[in-house]
Structure formats: C-alpha cells, structure tokens
Image (cartoon, grey):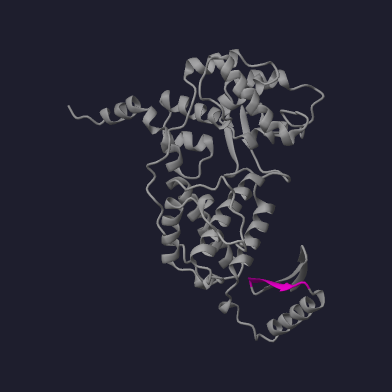
C-alpha cells in the first residue's frame, strides 16, 4: 500500500489507495517516517483517512512533478519545466510568502504572476540574504510566448497534483494566456542559401545537416535516431519512443524523399545492426555543441549572416514546405506540433497559396 523513500537527507512516504496517491515529506528521522507510514496505512485500512481533503504543500507537488518528468520526458523538457516552476517559486517568495499550500493559490495570484513576469527583471531585484531561491543573472523579463508556456506548465503541474491525490481543484484552469505579438519571425535559409550551405559543409557533417533540412527533425530526435526507425520499404522515418529517450511531442512518421533515401542507403552498411544509431558519433553528450559550432562555421563560409542555431534548419524545412504550397495542417503533422498555433508562424510565407485557395470560391 505504501513505501518509504529517501531523497538527500529527507525521508518521504508514498501511499496509494482506492486510485488516489499521497506523497508526504516527513523529515530526517527514518524511525519517525516508518511510524508515520504505519499509522497512515492503518487509518486507510480502517477507512479513517479522507483523501478528498488532501492539500499538499506546493514544494512537495513541484518535487513530485519534476520526479515524474525525469522519468517520462527528455532532459531538456524537464529542464524547461524546472525553469518555469522556479520562476513561479521566486514570484511567490517575493509577493506571497504566506502561500505554502496548493489550496492557497487562486486565479488572482496567477493573473499577478503574468504581470510580474512581463514587467519585472528578477536578476535586478534586491533580495534579502536569506532568500530561499537563487536568481540567475540571465533570468530576465518574460515575453508573451514564454509567459504562456509557464502558465501552461503550472496548469499541467496542478492537473498532475489532482491525479496524484495531492489536491482537489486546479486554480489555474481558467487563467487565460496572453496574446503573442512580441515574437520574432523564425530565421530560415532561402532556397539559394540552403544550396550554398550544403555545398560548403564538411564531409563529416553533411549527412547531419542534409537530414535536418529534409526531415525537419529536432536535435534530440536526430541524435536518438536508430536504424530500426528507418523503414526503407515504406520510405518512412519514424520518430519513436525509446527506453532511454522520449520524443517531445509523441511519435510520428516522416516520408523520405529521393535525396534522403539515397543518403541513408549509402550510410547503411551490412555491419550496422538495427539498434545502432544512424549517426554514431562518439561523445554523444557533447555532439549538440559540436554541431552548432560546425553550423556557424559553415554559414560563415557560405556568406550567410545571423544563422547560428540548429533549430533554424528545422525552420528552414517548414518554411520551404509552406513556400512550395504545402498546407499548414500537413506541416504541423510533419513537424510534430501539438498546437496548430505553433505552425502558424510560417503562415506569412504562403500569401499566394492562400489567395489561390480563396479564389477557387469566386463566383462567375
């Protein structure tokens, strides 16, 4: 029914009953934690514990959610969740230090949080010496898109708390997101720049950059691509979950064009097993940094300015599709966007295509 576990020097109890779950921090004494667990299990057996009145401390909720994320999400995703949670914790410590339990949160607090993130530069705050959280120097004001991501993250955290039996309601469920009007348009290569870029690639990195430009894969998706994910018969690349890695937005299939098919066939050798990585570089933990350096060098060699991010190759893939008349829902599916609004950043690239679509309705 329950278990005892330790994180650092602190003991916790974790109890499940009737589809509900309770996690509780006890303290540094193992003996006390064992007594609390035994007492709680006894109350549950005697039906004396009312799970409907659960109201966990916020710190316990956040810790439980991040532990869940570490198991079920990519490290980069967990890191983004951690940043969003930490920003909210800093806000509460500054503006609402009395708020310690989930039930103390309300709609007004989240509305004030949105204003705080838009107007306040945390790194410039004069906080007391005993302030419980470290504020990084690069912690800046949030743009609308960032604030919306943080609000959605907190909403997800509280939904997680409901499922875990740590709270009854989600006070962030009706909090509206901000209108996004401060996002920059994505940087992408023109058709001519993309050709120059590939022509100036070093032989070692050409297969990687060619794959980015022809599949729109995310960096993590490319680094974790295995030969078992390539279906040569169906001409498909499958982004799928692994025991050691989970894709950001679920599994999806990407068709392979002739260029990609030819490249992959050349790369595939008889000695490569199905579970081998398609891009078997050594020191994979530092590969992202090496690729970014190679990208900057290739862009400079090609005379391309302001092109420094691997993700811009994904933007290029999407932009070229839209510019060639591919509809946005199809682009959304190929990119693996969970929200069509994310894909809409490319809509300005297809004015002629959209006009042609409307003109088809013209009455004569």
Q: Position of residue 347 (x, y in %)?
A: 39, 33
Identity of the residue drawn at 53% across and 70% down: 99
Q: Is residue 255 left or right of residue 34?
A: left
Say if residue 35 shows up in the picture.
Answer: yes
What span is in magenta? 19-28
Camera-nearest residue between 265 and 278: 278
Identity of the residue drawn at 45% across and 61% down: 110
Q: Position of residue 246 (x, y in %)?
A: 66, 45
Task: Give residue 12's quadrant in the image.
Answer: bottom right
Camera-nearest residue between 323 and 7: 7
| Position above or below: 186 against 182 | above
Task: Give residue 244's quadrant in the image.
Answer: top right
Image quarter where the N terminus lies is bottom right
Image quarter where the C terminus lies is top left
Q: Is residue 143 left or right of residue 231?
A: left
The answer to if 20 sits in the magenta stretch is yes
Outermost residue to the left: 364
Q: Position of residue 162 (x, y in %)?
A: 56, 67
**Number of marks present in the image shown:** 0
Q: Main secondary structure of the magenta part?
A: strand
Camera-nearest residue between 40 and 20: 40
| Position above or below: 80 against 220 | below
Q: Position of residue 183 (x, y in %)?
A: 42, 39
Say if residue 233 shows up in the picture.
Answer: no
The answer to if 322 sits in the magenta stretch is no
């Amino acid at each position: 029914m329950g278990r005892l576990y330790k994180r650092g020097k602190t003991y916790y109890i974790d109890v499940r009953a009737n589809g509900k779950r309770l996690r509780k921090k006890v303290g540094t004494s193992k003996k006390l934690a064992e007594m609390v667990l035994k007492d709680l299990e006894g109350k549950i057996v005697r039906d004396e514990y009312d799970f409907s009145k659960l109201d966990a401390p916020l710190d316990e909720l956040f810790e439980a959610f991040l532990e869940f994320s570490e198991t079920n999400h990519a490290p980069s995703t967990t890191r983004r969740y951690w940043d969003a949670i930490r920003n909210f914790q800093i806000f509460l410590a500054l503006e609402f230090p009395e708020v310690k339990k989930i039930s103390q949160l309300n709609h007004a607090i989240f509305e004030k949080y949105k204003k705080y993130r838009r107007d306040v530069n945390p790194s410039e705050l004069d906080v007391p010496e005993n302030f419980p959280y470290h504020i990084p120097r690069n912690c800046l004001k949030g743009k609308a898109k960032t604030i919306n991501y943080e609000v959605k993250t907190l909403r997800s955290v509280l939904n997680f708390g409901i499922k875990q039996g740590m709270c009854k309601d989600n006070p962030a469920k009706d909090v509206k997101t901000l209108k996004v009007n401060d996002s920059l348009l994505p940087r992408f290569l023109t058709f001519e720049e993309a050709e120059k870029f590939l022509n100036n690639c070093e032989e070692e990195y050409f297969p990687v950059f060619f794959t980015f430009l022809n599949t729109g894969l995310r960096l993590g998706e490319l680094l974790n691509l295995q030969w078992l994910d390539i279906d040569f018969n169906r001409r498909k690349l499958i982004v799928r979950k692994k025991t050691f890695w989970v894709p950001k937005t679920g599994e999806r299939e990407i068709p392979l064009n002739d260029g990609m098919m030819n490249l992959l066939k050349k790369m595939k050798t008889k000695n490569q097993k199905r579970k081998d990585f398609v891009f078997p570089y050594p020191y994979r933990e530092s590969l992202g940094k090496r690729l970014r350096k190679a990208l900057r060098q290739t862009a400079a060699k090609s005379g391309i300015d302001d092109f420094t991010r691997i993700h811009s190759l994904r933007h290029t893939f999407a932009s070229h599709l839209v510019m060639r008349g591919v509809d946005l829902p199809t682009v959304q599916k190929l990119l693996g966007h969970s929200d069509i609004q994310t894909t809409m950043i490319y809509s300005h690239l297809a004015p002629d295509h959209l006009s042609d679509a409307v003109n088809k309705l013209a009455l004569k």
